[in-house]
Image (cartoon, rainbow, N blue to C red):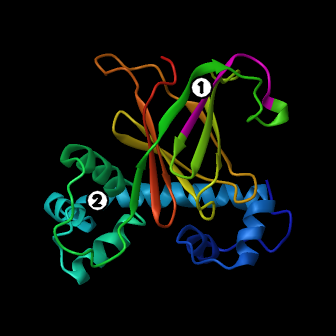
């Protein structure tokens, strides 16, 4: 697949887009060019893989994340942690787990920096048969389940469908409401980050294909979760059963 409106975006353009610093021209290019959007997705996955390799050396310590959540860091340290969280899916997920463990602890001092909003999506409807409205036209057909979630102003529709070619599953989603610019979706399987997708800035959709559902011998059943990453908000869709 080649760029439909050459010249193709450079790695610097893609990096700035993923950081939320790209101009409107780059955002429009990614919205209209499937090739460059796929390249942005691959670039995001490479960044996530590199971040995972450097995880222990570059991420805040568990104590720093705890103190950030409890607003015990000074202004400079809190700002550094917030900047890191805006880019790191691993620490974002850790912060969700930490917040769940700590509960809603009231702040004892004023916040030095605007903290990220951590939202946990709630399921609005049980899995229901779907007409495959989220799928590209050429992939429609077969059985699928539609899940609808709400988190603050965000509405997330997820459709799970059999992959006809590989026997695995496909996950297709649409995000509406909230801050719809520069959205990334991180997919976790059994607490391991396995894929990252760039959300189409115009349509709000994203796709994961060939998901490995069958557990290996001695491995626990596959349990998925999604984390939607916006500039100032993170949305977690926990305990996502795709069917094993």
| Visible residue check, residue 127 | yes
Horizontal and vertical percent for residue 31?
75, 61
Q: Earlier in the sequence, mark 2 or mark 1?
A: 2
Q: Residue at x 19, y 62 (%)?
A: 70
Give the residue displayed 17% in from the left and 57% down from the top: 62
Report whether 145 appears left or right of 231. Answer: right
57 or 178, nearer to the observer = 178
| Residue drawn at (63%, 19%) of the image | 128
Q: Position of residue 165 (x, y in %)?
A: 70, 23
Which residue is denoted by mark 2 in the rendering? 55
Vertical order, 149 against 89 (above or below): above
Q: Residue at x 22, y 78 (%)?
A: 77
Front residue of 2/79: it is: 79
Q: Secondary structure at mark 1?
A: strand
Going by the image, does 202 lie left or right of 105?
right
Query: What SS does tag 2 mark?
Result: helix
Q: Is residue 167 visible?
A: no
**Residue 33 x %, y %:** 79, 60
Q: Residues within 10 Å of mark 2 (few under 14, many from 20)?
A: some
Numbered range of the magenta stretch: 139-149
Residue 145 magenta: yes
**Residue 65 placement (x, y as % from top left):** 22, 61
The Cα atoms of the two marked residues, 2 and 1, are separated by 29 Å
Q: Is 175 in front, or is 221?
A: 175
Specify the quadrant of the image occupied by residue 234. bottom left
Residue 230 vertical placement versus 109 (above, below)? above
Q: In this figure, which residue is indicated by the disc labeled 1? A: 169
């Amino acid at each position: 697949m080649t760029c439909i409106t050459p010249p193709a975006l450079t790695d610097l353009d893609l990096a700035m887009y993923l950081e939320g610093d790209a101009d409107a021209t780059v955002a429009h290019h990614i919205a209209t060019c499937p090739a460059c959007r796929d390249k942005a997705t691959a670039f995001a996955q490479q960044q996530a893989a590199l971040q995972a390799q450097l995880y222990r050396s570059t991420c805040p310590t568990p104590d720093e994340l705890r103190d950030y959540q409890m607003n015990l860091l000074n202004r400079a340290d809190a700002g550094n942690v917030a900047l890191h969280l805006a880019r790191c899916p691993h620490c974002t997920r850790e912060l969700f787990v930490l917040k769940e463990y700590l509960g809603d602890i009231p702040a004892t001092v004023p916040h030095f920096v605007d903290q990220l909003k951590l939202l946990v999506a709630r399921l609005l409807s049980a899995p229901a048969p779907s007409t495959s409205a989220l799928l590209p036209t050429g992939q429609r057909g077969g059985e699928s389940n539609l899940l609808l979630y709400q988190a603050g102003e965000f509405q997330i529709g997820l459709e799970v469908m059999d992959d006809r070619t590989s026997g695995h599953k496909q996950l297709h989603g649409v995000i509406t409401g909230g801050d719809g610019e520069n959205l990334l979706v991180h997919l976790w399987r059994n607490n391991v980050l396995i894929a990252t997708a760039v959300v189409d800035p115009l349509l709000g959709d994203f796709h994961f294909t060939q998901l490995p559902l069958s557990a290996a011998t001695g491995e626990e059943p596959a349990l998925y979760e999604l984390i939607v990453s916006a500039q100032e908000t993170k949305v977690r869709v926990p305990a996502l059963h795709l069917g094993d």
